[in-house]
Image: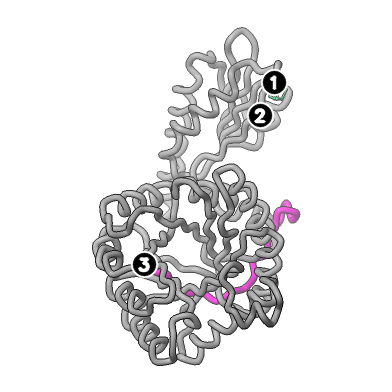
Amino acid sequence: MSLNSVRPWRTIERRKSRQIMVGKVPVGGDAPISVQTMTNTLTSDVKATLDQVIRSAEVGADIVRISTPDQDSTRALREICRESPVPIVADIHFHYKRAIEAAEAGAACLRINPGNIGDAARVREVIKAAKDHGCSIRIGVNAGSLEKHLLEKYGEPCPEAMVESGLDHIRILEDNDFHEFKISVKASDVFLAAAAYQALAEATDAPIHLGITEAGGLTTGTVKSAIGLGNLLWMGIGDTLRVSLSADPVEEVKVGFEILKALGLRTRGVQIISCPSCARQGFDVIRTVEALEKRLEHIKTPMSLSIIGCVVNGPGEALMTDIGFTGGGAGSGMVYMAGKQSHKMTNAQMIEEIVRLVEERAEAIEAAQNAAE
Ligand code: SF4
């Protein structure tokens, strides 16, 4: 019996989209919602760009996007794509030749709006390159760069204009018998983005790429993205996402995963449940959680850990987590394993001991999974 049949209030019914491939990563249909980020290095600096791609992949990025504004970038893309552990999306604006070069260089997907690259012959050339090299395409509509005729028709960026723009681009691809595409309708305004995405979800069965664009810095952008993307995901909309932050791409991936984890849509690594702490705490909760987050970054196996300052909430939270620690008196607390009291531990030992317990548990879960395969 699945968790959701026991607790129906947790159920999210995903919109039915068709599935496409971004390299080896399926997007849409019943594929897990993939997490993307984008590098912010000079693409021509292969080493720096690859380093960001690899660091992003290590914290869970499924797909990474890279800007290719010039020929130096598309040249560098060849080595980056060859060495990257995850599929690369080449970000192209207007220059159809960059799109062809990126497809030839090994990009798994082209982010390009076919309506913006010129006449029908150019569009055909780009689509042929995408087909020849097994690239998918992401149509990326942005409220800030809507076509002039749509702004004139609607007066200002609005959900209707964004969806119309998206459908116009879709039509161009479909007229050229190209169906391996996904689409986004991003805006920095949460209300506008959410309304546009809802209308888009009704208008097409293409996989949807979610994003609140130019969301802001780490804190403000995280809050905006969690509200905007969180609402849409909760409605079942979204097959892949990027959290846009003025921050290290690694942070974007972490935030994206946390949004999915909070909604139970994906799991990865240790989910720490911790209390805010107060005068009742039996140990320094904040410092401990900070230390544990760093020490447990390498764990990929999904599991839960509760770190609670005192018995007010500790035993209750421990009931629902794989491993728990609840602060007590006299410099020690209680360890819980699978919801049951296990043993006492001093505060001085707890970080080392909890890291050891989590690593052991991760190994046991992995071993059981491998044996079952
Ligand atoms: S669990 Fe205890 S220490 Fe933590 S906030 Fe609640 S009362 Fe305070």
**Residue 69 badge:** 3
Q: Is residue 234 left or right of residue 218?
A: right
Q: CA distance from mark 3 to mark 2?
A: 46 Å
Q: Is residue 195 left or right of residue 330?
A: right
Note whether 351 is above or below 222 in the view shown: above
Task: Determine which residue is flagged by label 2.
Answer: 275
Q: Nearer the viewer, mark 3 or mark 2?
A: 3
Earlier along the polypeptide chain: callout 3 or callout 2? 3
Q: Is residue 306 visible?
A: yes
Q: Residue 360: image x %, image y %?
A: 43, 33
Note whether 222 is above or below 76 in the view shown: above
Question: Ligand 1 is located in which of the four quadrants?
Answer: top right
Q: Is residue 334 left or right of residue 79?
A: right
Q: Secondary structure at mark 3?
A: loop
Q: Quadrant of residue 197?
A: bottom right
Q: Residue at x 54, y 47 (%)?
A: 255
Q: Nearer the viewer, mark 3 or mark 1?
A: 3
Q: State the extent of the magenta-drawn residues as a range.
A: 5-23
Q: Residue 44: image x %, image y %?
A: 28, 59
Q: Quadrant of residue 212?
A: bottom right
